[in-house]
Amino acid sequence: MSLWTHRDFVRLWIGQSASQLASFAAEVTLPLVAVTSLGAAATQLGVLRAVQQLPILLFSLVVGVLVDRWRFRTVLVAADLGRALVFASVPLGLGLGLPFLYVVGFVAGTFTVCFDVAYQSALPRLVERNQLAQGNSMLETTRSAAQISGPALGGGLVSLLTAPIAVLSSAALFAFSSLSVAQIRNRTTTGVPRTGVLRQIGEGLRIVRHDKSLRAIAAATCVYQFGFTALTTVYLLFLSRTLDLPSAVVGLVLASFGPGVLIGSLLSAWLPRRFGYGPVVVFAALISDLVMLTTSTLHGSGPMTIAALIVINILYGALSQSVDVAVTAIRQLVTPLDVQGRVVATINFLGLGLTPFGALLGGAAAGGLGIRAALLMSTLALLLSPLCLSLSPLARLRHLS
């Protein structure tokens, strides 16, 4: 059965699409409020970004327990209603200054953690196992489209209106998302006993540790996030200083990741059917990292270099996104329904927990070894991810059943 005729999934898909568009638009509008309305300096913008990310480390594991205890619909609706109210308060609270925006960023970030864990855990409870690939592909396609169009929407609204008023667009989209998700009729719960939160967090950690497939996914995610954060820390320096590209060209090169991610989302349901999940996960990850490895060989700022960077980014985005969607479907398949939330939260926590160290290593390597050497080193670190996957049972997986 096509998921287009699955009413509950369509309601989830519409809500998730609106929510992702609101999130990516807010990534532009909220910092612009700080800059244009409150005169924030660069360091203050860094603090705003940090407080938005802090809830991932503080609350992911606890949120995983709540998602497994409650109906996913309840968590999704509450998270988006909460974000709608928080962003709607921005024009009213500007008189309180930057501390108010820090609170907005932290609270909105907390609700974002709730929504992300819940929607990633919802799909296996809504659809059949043989529909997971299609469902993940549809959700990731709209997320990728929102990643491209959300910042453009936010920037356009700021230019037409003002930054504080533009923030209200995200509030309206979050409210619309909550209305769509609230129409989901699936009321199933996992029946998780109301034991201690720490005990249930520990159960999620044990499941990831003892299941070979989940352990491989967690390990691959950790080393990938570590290497990718180091890479992105150095990459901008490489474009602007080593290649001496103008700012406009740097923006064009960075933007080329977006179409690649969108292409990967569109192909992510077809590739595993054609080649099998194991080969897609291992070889697409390997090829994408090898493609990115060629970046460190580029020199100069001529048209050929710019064209090569764009092609590399599109290929890398498409292949890595295909891997991400396939791994998500595998994780959903091998994880029991009553621990979906905790497994998602555990893997997210472990993966994102290493990102600050990756950023520090990338910066230190660029300063000590040089930008080109640091770029090469961080890209080589990405290759540990397909290595982890190739040594696991995932490499032999052909079809989801």
Image (tube, helix red, strand yellow):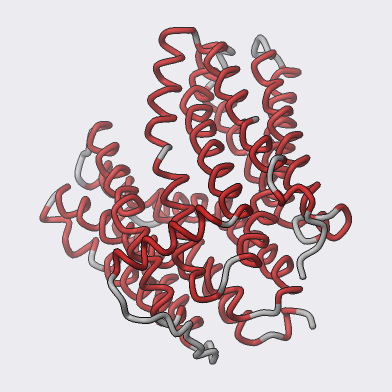
Give the quarter of the figure containing the C terminus.
bottom right
Above or below 288: residue 262? below
Q: Quadrant of residue 111?
A: bottom left
The answer to whether any part of residue 290 appears in the image is: yes
The residue shown at (65%, 54%) is 327
User: At which x and y percent is residue 309?
Assistant: 69, 26
The answer to whether any part of residue 18 appears in the image is: no
Above or below 119: residue 269? above
In the current view of this chain or complex, which residue is farthest to the front?
A: 210
The residue shown at (28%, 72%) is 196
Q: Quadrant of residue 329?
A: bottom right
The residue shown at (54%, 48%) is 218
Above or below 372: residue 14? below
Residues 129 and 264: in front is 129
Residues 295 and 206: in front is 206
User: At which x and y percent is residue 238?
Assistant: 54, 17
Give the quarter of the figure containing the N terminus.
bottom right
Above or below 92: residue 388? above
Q: Is residue 362 left or right of residue 276?
A: left
Residues 36 and 47: in front is 47
Q: How many marks?
A: 0
User: At which x and y percent is residue 190?
Assistant: 48, 82
In the current view of this chain or complex, which residue is farthest to the right?
A: 274
Q: Is residue 381 left or right of residue 165?
A: right
User: At which x and y percent is residue 258?
Assistant: 63, 45
The residue shown at (68%, 66%) is 138
Q: Is residue 77 left or right of residue 232?
A: left
